[in-house]
Amino acid sequence: MRGTRLAAMLAVACAGMAISAPVAAAQMLALRGTEPPNRANNTLSGASLLEKDPMATRLDDAPGFAASDTGAPQDTDDAQPALRTTLDAASPAADYARQDPFAAANRTAGSADARNGTNEELDTASGAASTDGAPPSLPDLGTDIGQDDTASGDLAAPPTTGRAAASGLTGPQDAETTGTIPARSIDRNEQDRNSRAEKANQRTQAIEGLKPKPEDDPYAALGIRGGGFILRPSLETGLTATSNANSSPGGKSAILSESTLRLNAASDWSDKTATIQAYGSWRKSISGQDLSEPSAGIDTSLEVPLGNDFVARGTLGYSLIPESPSSPGFPAGTHGEPLTHTVTGSLGLEKRVGKLRLGLTGNVERATYGDADLVGGGTASQHDRDSTLVSATLRTGYEISPALIPFVEAEIGRRYYDLETDSAGYRRSADRLGLRAGIALDLGDKLRGEFSAGYLREKADDPRLPAIAGPSIASTLNWSPMRGTIVTLNSSTTVESSTSAGESGSLLYSADLSIERQMRTNLTGTASIGGFYRDYIGIDGRDVGWDATLGFTYWLNRYFGVTGRLRHEELASNLPDRDYKTNSVFLGVKVQR
């Protein structure tokens, strides 16, 4: 059997030497499987012999075998035999492919016959070339010597169904085709493919190189944290030169040493809000009229949300101030100013029902008067002026918007005097009634507060005393028209008691308008103007007074500053011995933390 195979191969080789060179080349290509067998002479080709015996050694198994070289172990481009394509079998097409590696990819199908598998085959016998100067067409890549051709008598013929498309991209690929398919050329107009993608993760600047955010108020107090509060203490001390030391009709000039210690605190709790404002002041004469006036006060507030749209609010305050000689109840024939103690407290509950705001608040105010020193010696008791006011206020509001809530409220209460009858035999305890309407505003830091107006009445138990009644006003508004400017308006109506025979007391209307302007980061200016009107009940008497103040604070640093004030006070009355004027100048320093 092995001898028969060797004889057949020798016969094929001898036949190849007897034919012409072109025919030998064509048969050699057929033996490699890249050229179909010669069907013109209906003779059995060498490829058929190899395909009939699959155990026979193929001539193309020799390394680097091509039509132009015989038996070369490896091609000059160092390509391994297993990786070479059948295009290397035809040297003209291979040379053209090396010159233009994208020629196969850019070449179109040429005609409908190419897509239908009817491309003309290379006529190796005549060696005809293309007439248009293009490189000769490549051999059919889809043919295989294993196809049977009954018309020609060949035992094997190349299949026609495995032909690859001429472009190498759009047509179906032959499962046995080897080699790398050329990639599509990049279109220069495709910006998405040609442009470089931008970095999405830019490098962040180092912390050391970042500029710190400027402070809104670089000279504001930093505060001290303690006990859940931020404490901001301050101390102001200096000298005051005044033309009227105690602001009285008979007051004289003096130089006073004046010191004030203040403490403001705010809580940093997450669910509750608490504030504390306390002060203590001392005025002492250095020269001129003898004067020694201590004063102190503290006001606290607490707000606690209880859930279910309930909010509880409470306040507590205390004040210790000397009674002014211009007060209508100031005892005659005394020197110095007796001290007045006042304790206030309130507790309220507010409920939200849709847009309705319902609130109930209870108030307590306790006022006591110290003994007065008589000019001739001894003291005079003012215990008959001590009283306690207890009242309840019911408020109903409607929320037009979160920043605008009109309301109406009614107040009912009673003032209890410690003594059932005073020194003149009058029963001073009285019933209190008030009706007011107003509006509450909340525009954040721009505008906040409320204003109300109505009617207030207190009727003593003694029928000989007329009722203290009249219009009432109350307001607390904070307005910031521009950055660094704060405008504050406060007004109130107060019932003042009296121990004079036949006099029920008086209604005091007071208002104060102040402006604080930050002219520079370290310079703050203040201006205020206030006035009051006192209407005496039971007699034809009235007092009118006003005051104005200009001040400044210049900060040398965050903790130390220089401050000063100019102040004018004046009172005019239709009652005798009540008029006075006061001008004063204060200059000092201020320390804060």
Image (spheres, rainbow, N blue to C red):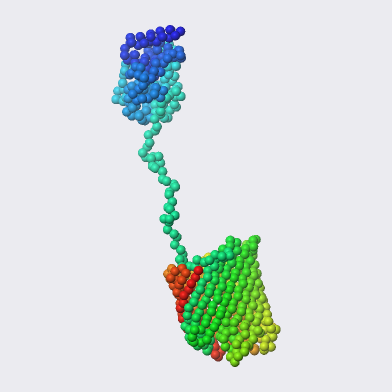
| Image position, residue 270 (x, y; %) | 58, 61
Report whether residue 150 is seen. no
| Image position, residue 138 (x, y; %) | 36, 23
Tell me which residue sits at (62%, 63%) in the image: 305
| Image position, residue 404 (x, y; %) | 56, 66
Tell me which residue sits at (35%, 11%) in the image: 16
Establish if 151 lies above or below 351. above
In this rendering, would 574 be left or right of 525?
right
Establish if 102 lies above or below 432. above
Which of the 4 image quadrants contains residue 510? bottom right
Out of 293 and 481, give the one closest to the viewer.
293
Outermost right residue:
420
Report the number of discs.
0
In this rendering, would 272 be left or right of 151?
right
Tell me which residue sits at (60%, 69%) in the image: 301
Report whether residue 29 is seen. yes
Out of 5 and 239, give the one closest to the viewer.
239
Which of the 4 image quadrants contains residue 418? bottom right
Establish if 46 lies above or below 546. above
Out of 267 and 446, give the one closest to the viewer.
267
Which of the 4 image quadrants contains residue 392? bottom right
| Image position, residue 189 (x, y; %) | 37, 40
In this rendering, would 367 be left or right of 214?
right
Tell me which residue sits at (53%, 85%) in the image: 291
Outermost front residue:
286
Establish if 478 lies above or below 575. above
